[in-house]
Image: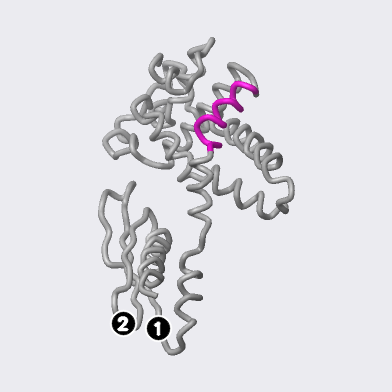
Amino acid sequence: MHTLEEKLGYSFRDKALLRGALYHSSYANEHRGAGISSNERLEFLGDAVLGLVTAEFLYKKHPNAPEGDLTRIRAALVCEESLHEVALSLGLGDYLKLGRGEETGGGRQRPSILADATESVFAAVYLDGGMEAARALIHRVLLNKEREEDVEERRRDYKTLLQEFVQRKPGQTLGYEMVGSSGPDHAKVFTACVMLNGQPAGLGSGRSKKEAEQSAAKAALEHLQSEE
């Protein structure tokens, strides 16, 4: 736990809070007699703390942005993908307590479990050190410039941009094909190909078919623009 505290940049007064944030429901169910509770309640609280800190951050950083834009940016910042990335940077999966079935089924790498645990840790810090401690942690691991740039990149709709680019020349046909997938069910990676006039124009991969198509559209757009 000391190593995880160092990664978090926070030392708990009540170590039980940090341990509780790492108890998955599958582990708690197997240890009911030991009085162990899952991290689901902490996840609920952490989601609220994260939402408030992120909303406050965006409200101050973008004083002229309309409510709709702030809502979209916040959703991208606190989505499962972002929280999963935070968990990976902290090595949170190494500290999780999982039931035997979840362990053998790859739960330690499952994005949803890691994202939920990240919110639980935020809540544990909040309960142990108050809002200032939680705010400092969230800013340090999530609300930084590099992650904002990643979010802005994800918000770009490359399929629409590619469609607009292709439509500059009449008579062209544009489509997408799924050409493969790999990995276990809990961490599957899809590969898509952009077909322009029946010919491959760009490949891309992602954790969903939609994400793969966006990645392929980006590759195709960059390639076509470089040929102009």
Q: Earlier in the sequence, mark 1 or mark 2?
A: 1
Q: Secondary structure at mark 2?
A: loop
Q: Are marks 1 and 2 in contact (CB under 8 Å)?
A: yes
Viewer-side residue, 29 vs 196: 196
Picture layout, residue 190 above or below residue 223: above
Q: Identify the amino acid type marked 2.
A: Gly
- Residue 134 falls inside the magenta stretch: yes
Where is residue 209 shown, x and y percent of the image?
A: 38, 61
Task: Tell me how the rendering is colored.
Answer: one colour
Viewer-side residue, 193 vs 16: 193
- Magenta part of the chain: 132-144
Q: Residues within 10 Å of mark 1 (few under 14, many from 20)?
A: few
Where is residue 89 shown, x and y percent of the image?
A: 40, 33
Q: Secondary structure at mark 1?
A: loop
Residue at 42 percent across and 34 percent down: it is: 87
Judged from this view, the residue extending furthest toward the front is: 228
Q: Identify the amino acid type marked 1.
A: Thr
From the viewer's perspective, is 8 left or right of 133? left
Picture layout, residue 214 above or below residue 51: below
Residue at 33 percent across and 68 percent down: it is: 202
Where is residue 135 shown, x and y percent of the image?
A: 61, 27
Residue at 48 percent across and 32 percent down: it is: 118
What is the C-alpha distance between the residues marked 1 and 2? 7 Å
Where is residue 73 shown, x and y percent of the image?
A: 60, 49
- Residue bearing mark 2: 198
Residue at 42 percent across and 36 percent down: it is: 114
- Residue bearing mark 1: 173
Viewport quadrant of the C terminus: bottom left
